[in-house]
Amino acid sequence: MAVNKSNLPTSPQVVELQDNELPVFEVQPDQNLASDFHKRLIQMIAEFELALDEQHEVGMRLVSFGQNVTLRVDGIGYYNPSLIRFFGTTEAGAPVELIQHVSQISFLLMAVKKADPANPPKRIGFNPPEVEKEAGKEDV
């Protein structure tokens, strides 16, 4: 049976099959790149930051390490096709960088007291770059 391109679904969905037909989906070439996850993370952090007052910044509690690790987020970057980077400091002020595969990202966003009470709180989600710094990687 010939496949009519106009009948192809553009996203995963329930497809009613006839006899021995197999479902056919269009493949989007750049789906699920780290850069796409990066954009979604920035958007979710921006939404979370809307509820923060001037005394708090966004922090993360890492869920997958089996210990209590909280970090103040200073930046988020990526390397395509699949690595996300989180830059920040621990509660004690030690610099940290977490490099994680997009399939393993799991953390809890939380409000933390801002590091320097004299300065405005850092807002990650409201400062996305206009242009990528280099092809295939970006830091915010």
Image (cartoon, grey):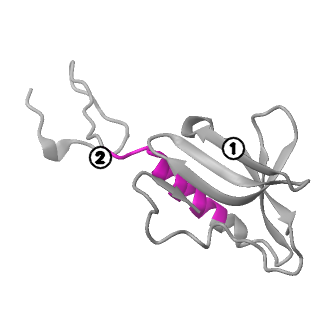
Is 57 left or right of 24, judged from the image as shown? right
Q: Residue at x 85, y 69 (%)?
A: 114
Is 89 left or right of 87, judged from the image as shown? right
Residue 105 seen from this side: no
The residue under label 1 is which amino acid type?
Leu
Reply above or below: 113 against 90: below
The part of the chain drawn in magenta is 29-45
The x, y position of residue 52, in whole percent, is 78, 72
Is residue 137 on the magenta stretch? no
Residue at mark 1: 98
- How many angstroms separate mark 2 from mark 1 (CA)? 34 Å
The x, y position of residue 43, in whole percent, is 57, 63
Looking at the image, tell me whether mark 2 or mark 1 is earlier in sequence order.
2
Q: Residue at x 25, y 24 (%)?
A: 22
The x, y position of residue 72, in whole percent, is 79, 58
Q: How many marks?
A: 2
Which secondary structure dominates the residues rendered in magenta? helix
Q: Residue at x 82, y 62 (%)?
A: 111
In what element is the residue under mark 1? strand
Q: Residue at x 12, y 34 (%)?
A: 3
Reply above or below: 78 against 65: below
- Quadrant location, the N terminus: top left
Is 3 left or right of 100, judged from the image as shown? left
Reply above or below: 71 against 50: above
Tag shown at residue 10: 2
Tag shown at residue 31: none
Front residue of this view, candidates 99 and 5:
99
Residue 124 seen from this side: yes
In what element is the residue under mark 2? loop
Q: Contact, CB < 8 Å: mark 2 with mark 1? A: no
